Amino acid sequence: MNRKFALFLMIATGNCRAALIRVAMVNDAEQIASVHSAAFAATYKKVLSREVYEPMLGRIGQGRWEKYLKTPPDNSFLLVAEVQNKIVGFTVVSAQQNEDEFSKQAGCDCEITHLYVHPSFQQKGVGAQLIAEAKTHLKAQGCKHLFATTLEEIEASKIYLRKGATLLGSRECPKDPTVREVFYGFRLDSK
């Protein structure tokens, strides 16, 4: 079976369990930016006001990810999901406490700051694989409670509940009052 057909078969059947999850390298920046741009546009264009969406979209680019990968913040890492040698998703995780009221109340000591999957690979298990691997890495670093923030209006936000998170709370989004932020927490110190 040739590679293009195998990739088509995985997409058509919704089976991306074969995605390779690994730590990102500097030369991944272009593909990460491509996934980020495509996933951001597909997800947020329908949800955010134009005044908020357009400037945020303008900040997405290869240079941003090259800079991050060359000099990542302390206690932070970026994982990518690869299918057939192509990056189809990524997550950025920080082992630092978020200063948000919900994360403080829950005692969270690490956070998923980005989770993006290319639109053609959404709803195929890639995001779940990225979350699972991030939790494994964080647990090994001694983190006990993982925090994630997203928007209530995004259908994919429910992935956190499906992967074992607890809803910590919600509020009006400070950047765009037409939407609501939702906050999730995972316990990493239990099975």
Image (tube, rainbow, N blue to C red):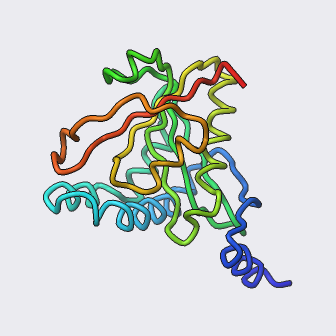
Exactly how many numbered labels are in the figure? Answer: 0
Instruction: Say which quarter of the image contains residue 132.
Output: top right
Say which residue appears at 48% left-offset and 37% top-offset. 112
163 vs 28, nearest the viewer: 163
Say which residue appears at 18% left-offset and 38% top-offset. 174
Q: Is residue 97 visible?
A: yes
Q: From the viewer's perspective, is residue 5 above or below residue 72?
A: below
Say which residue appears at 70% left-offset and 64% top-offset. 16
* Percent coordinates x, y for residue 91 in the rendering: 53, 46
User: From the viewer's perspective, is 123 left or right of 62?
Assistant: right
105 vs 82, nearest the viewer: 105
Q: Is residue 75 visible?
A: no
* Percent coordinates x, y for residue 7 in the rendering: 71, 76
* Percent coordinates x, y for residue 42 in the rendering: 38, 67
Instruction: Say which quarter of the image contains residue 131.
Output: top right
The N terminus lies in quadrant:
bottom right
Say which residue appears at 74% left-offset and 59% top-offset. 17
User: From the viewer's perspective, is 100 left or right of 13?
Assistant: left
* Percent coordinates x, y for residue 36 in the rendering: 44, 59
Instruction: Say which quarter of the image contains residue 175.
Output: top left
The C terminus lies in quadrant:
top right
User: From the viewer's perspective, is 56 left or right of 74?
Assistant: left
